[in-house]
Structure formats: structure tokens, C-alpha cells
Image (tube, rainbow, N blue to C red):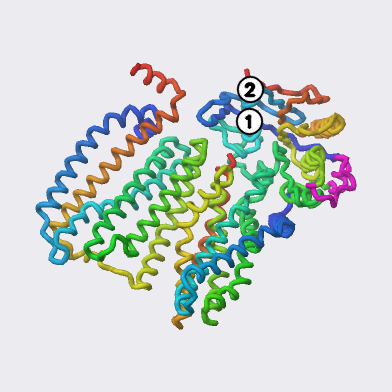
Amino acid sequence: MKPATLPQAFAILLRRDLTLAYRRRSEIINPLLFFVLVTAMFPLGVGADPALLRDIGPGIIWVAALLAALLSLETVFRSDFDDGSLEQLLLSPHPLSVLMIAKVLAHWLVTGLPLLIVAPLLSILLHLSDDAMHTLLITLALGTPVLSLVGAIGVALTVGLRKGGTILSILVMPLYVPVLIFAASAVANSDAGLPVNAHLSLLAALLVLATSLSPAATAASLRISMS
Amino acid sequence: MLHFFHKLASPKHFYRISGNWIPWLGLACFGFTLAGLYEGLLVAPTDYQQGDSYRIMFIHVPAAWMSLFIYMVMAGAGVIGLVWRIKLAEIMAISSAHIGASFTFLALITGSIWGKPMWGAWWVWDARLTSELILLFLYLGVIALYNAVEDSRTAARATSILALVGVVNIPIIHFSVEWWNTLHQGPTVTKFGAPSIDIHMLIPLLLMAVAFKLFYVMVLLMRARVEVLQRERNTGWVQELVSDYE
Amino acid sequence: MNHTYTAATLEARDIACIRDDRTLFDKLSFTLEAGQAVLVEGRNGSGKTSLLRILCGIRQPDEGTIHWNGGDIYRLATGYNAATAWVGHKDGIKLELSAEENLVFARSLGTPSGLEISDALEAMELGGFDDVIAINLSAGQKRRLALARLLVTRSPLWILDEPFTSLDTHGISLIENMINIHLADGGMLAVTSHHPVGLDSADITRINLSE
């Protein structure tokens, strides 16, 4: 018998993580509620002037998305580390970086994708135009996978630590700056009726870069923090 | 030559040799600082626009250069430590982090002091200052991670990866911040016309840059020596060294 | 499990382990051939688990090298992983997944032995527990489920850290029997245990890390 093929292992790992997420549904719901609540706090804090909300809306939604991503990030490896499955992943005959793509993909599907679903609701709350809402969805689709991919490196570096949570945000947040800038300004531009192609291309470039580099960095980080 | 480096990379020899270098580095650093301050404060002409307040540039600009330079050194040493598992490279990488963070902080503080008379505010979201601020966050992340991991070798390896990720990101962050800045039309007063800079301003700038580099190397060696002693505390040569002092 | 494993050699050359600047062991060398077992003994904190983690490649030795059929295990990397199976302190099973789902996943991370999952569960006396979510299993049953990984995959080198934890006498003899078949088949074993391991073959190397 030969080892299970890589595509098989990839599919089984992806399915396993999705099954697990389904069986612990609160893990999906909590960051999502957080995303909505944080956004809803802003009008209460800064006042309900529609023009003002429209002005700061793109930034608010994107900062909230960033925080929601940070909040859910730990779940990528936490339970696998606690119960010893992570050691099994590390010792499989498959390239670890490919398995990492499966882990991050599963994580994005359960934490990133739902943000896209509630985003239209939030853009109504903040009086964004239809164009801006449209752009918001594209930026979320391009940007949140980058947050998951880059965040996974941070989680891999802190997974063995007792107080990993706070350190994780310090490590990862500065790395999120480019996504925040390109995405939020794309939405703001489109609300003002300006072109957004450049922003979206840059976001797409970030996604390509993160997809190609971050799995290997995540794998290397995991090997170090597990040793 | 190779033999020399190989010998230097052993903690014991490093400790012995570096001890001899530090006084000389200190002396050279002192000389360059003195010369730089003299040229910068007394010889360099008053700026027709900013008056004398621009002279803080002779601290601010070299500090900003150092902040980036040290990050590169840190990541480079980290890679060497990761690939060849050389202990001394790991030590150099982590010893650089604190110095780099200090220079970044210095650049931020001096930038803000410089900005006060020009912008009328202590802080303006200018592209350079913002990049510098994010660089400080990157340094703080490296330091926080190093302090959080208990085993010192694992910690050094983990921070090396983080520094490497940072190096890939720095140009992207820099570019995005520039972009963001032009978009929001922030103040661009700090932009010096680089080619038109007066030669009498350039000389002290370069003198100070050399002085800062020397200072960095000196402090780096000092920190690395302490780190070496701490890590090798159970080995024979450190025990001997300590018993010599008693 | 009729086939015997192809002959292989595991060789540790002068390995050392330093944890938090404390040397747990150094200059440790041994060789393990087909059908042989190495039993790691020592007090708590003497580095037994660290040694096993080094052997399976999770941790790198601070000095020295480990060779599998003459090749450094860090060069072989995933090739070496295909030859080893690890059951550590932690069971490595997902409590929210059923026994069967756990083994399907475990099998995808190794070389399938060809043994059906239900048969492997049967052999571990977990027959009929296929669809039971692991959280509902007792500690001993969870341990047996973890050890069932060794049956659904086929790895010549088993590295087991305290395999008998939470098992009763019957469970222990079940595992001992499984290990004896593995060794008779030409497999290899590296193990730590507080409980004396009842092995048929006398071909055991003992390493005491406290001496």
C-alpha cells in the first residue's frame, strides 16, 4: 500500500475541520456577532449623522473585520495543539505547508466568508451607497483570506504559549496594515464615485503573495514552536 | 579568514575578542559624535525656511536610517541562525531588537519635536512618521514574542521567522502608507529635496550616521556578551570566568 | 498484517538534549534494528519524552544526528515520517469526532495498512463504537482509540510515550500483544513506560536517562 495521496489528505483534513466547526457552531457565530456589534457601537459613540457615518463607514467596517479576524484566529491551531492532533499533522508524510493551506482554507470558510454575508447589512447601517457596498464585498472577499493566511503565521508562532492571545494581536496587527489601507480606501473611493481598480489589483496582489509565502512560513513556525 | 569567522562564532572566543573591541568602538563613536555635533550645530547654515529647528534632523534622520538598518541586520542574523543553527547569530538577532526599537522610538520622538513648530501639533499622520510607528510595532512584536517563549533557543528561532515575515512586509507597509498618505493629502513638509541639500548639512548628517552605526555595534556587542554569559552559564569557561572574579 | 516489514535501521549518534539551558542527556548513542525494541527509562523530568520527540523528529537534537537506513532524518523529512507512527502523552484524537472519523483522518496522515477501520476498532475491543463521538468514550477507550491508529496505518517504527496510561490490566495485555505481533513482523519500537512492558522477544535495549 502507498501513503494516502496528498489531494486525499487535503480533502480529508478540510472536511474534518469543517465538520468540527459545524459541531462547535458557536465558534463561527461569536466572531460574526462581534463584527456586527463593534460596527453598531460606532454610531452610538460618534453620533448618527448620516454624512459622518458614510465618511467613516468603510474604515469602521474594515477595522471591525480585522478585529473579528483576530478574535477567531486562535482557533486555527488551538484545539489541535491541546489534544495532540497537531503533532500528528507535523509527522505526516505529506508536505506540511500544503496541509496548512487546508487548515487556513477551512478557517476562512467558517470565519471569513460569513463576514461577507453580514457586510451588506452593516453597509446599510452606515449609509454606504450601493456601489460602496459592492466594493466592500469584493474587498472582503480579497482581503479576509489574507488576514487568515498572515494570521496563521502568528498563531503558529504563539500556539505553545500560555498567554498567546494578547501577544498574537501585537504580532499580527502591524502586518494587517496594508490590507486595511487598500481595502478601506477602496470602499471610500467607490462611495465618492472614484475608480477603485488600482486598489483591488493591489489587494489581489497581496492575496497572491500571501497564498504563496505564508503556508511555508506557517509550517516552519509550527515546527519551531512545537519543538 | 574563514577560520577567523569560525573561531569568532564560538561564544567563548566571541566573548574574549569582543571585549577588546568595545573600548575602541566607544572611542570612535565619541569622536564621530563630537565632530557631527560640531558640524551640525555650529558649521551648518541656518535654514531659510525652518530657521534653526531643522538641526534636530541630525539626530532624527540617522535614527530613522538606523531603525530600518537594524531590522535588516536582525532578520539577516536570524536567517543565518535558522539555516546554519549558529548560536551567535541568534544572539545577535535578538540583541539587535531592543536597540532597533530604541532607535525607532528616538526617530519618532525627534520627528514629533521637529514637527511641532512646523505643523503646530506634536503628532501628524505624515507618511514617514506613520511608517516609523508601524516599524516600532513590528519591533515590539519581536521583543514580546522573545520574552514569551521560555526556551531561549526556541525563542530565538521563532523571533527570526517573525523578523523575516516583517522584512517581507516592510516594503509593502511602506508603500501602502505612502499611498494612504497621498490619498488623504496629509502634510508633506518633511520631504527634503534630497539633491538640493546643502553640502554643509550633508556632512554632519553623514558624520552622525557613522556615529550611530558605531554606537549600535558597540551596544550590540555589549548586549550579546551578556546574553552569551547567560546562555553559557553552565559551561566550564563561564564558571572559570566567574571564579576569576571572586 | 501478514507481510513483514523490510529491514531498516534507526541509529542515534551522540545525541544531546538541552532544555531551558539544562542538559538532560548527551552523548547518547544506540542502534535499533528490525524486530528490536528500545525501552527508555528514567525519573520524571529526565528527558524521556524529549528523547522520543527527538526520535520522531518533532524536536531537533541539540547535538548529534539520527539516521534512518543511513540517512539523516532531517534530510529525509517527510520520507522518515512515512516510516514512523507516534502516540504521545496526548491522545491526538478529536473529541467532537466519532471513532471512525478519527481513524479516517489518522489513516490519511500515514500509509494505510489495508485493515478496515471497523476491524481495527474490533481489535482494540472498541467494536460497535464506530459512530460514537469520542467525547463519550472513557479515558481507557480514548487511549485504545489513539493506539488503533497504529493498526490502520502501516509504519515500521512505533514511537510510544506511556502507551499504557489509563488502561486496565486487560487493555495493557491487549496492547502488549499488539506490540509483540509488530515486533515479530519485523517492526521496531521505541517506548517509555512506568509499567513493565511484557515483551516476548528478549531483544530489548534499555536506556536509563537517570544514570
Does C202 appear above or below A125?
above
Numbered badge on residue C51: 1
**Residue B159 at x, y = what percent?**
47, 45
> Dots 1 and 2: beta carbons under 8 Å?
yes
Q: CA distance from mark 1 to mark 2?
A: 9 Å
Give the crowd class for mark 1: few <14, some 14-19, many >=20 residues within 10 Å. Answer: many
Task: Classify the position of the N terminus of chain B by image quarter.
Answer: top left
Of callouts 1 and 2, which one flags the residue occurring earlier in the amino acid sequence? 1
Tag 2 residue: C209
Highlighted magenta segment, given as a residue range: C115-135
Give the chain letter at badge 1: C
Q: What residue is at 64 percent from the left and 60 percent from the top?
A: A30
Q: Is residue C134 magenta?
A: yes
**Residue B239 at x, y = what percent?**
41, 20
Task: Give C49 or B133, whichever is nearer the viewer.
Answer: B133
Task: Give A43 or A206, whichever is nearer the viewer.
Answer: A43
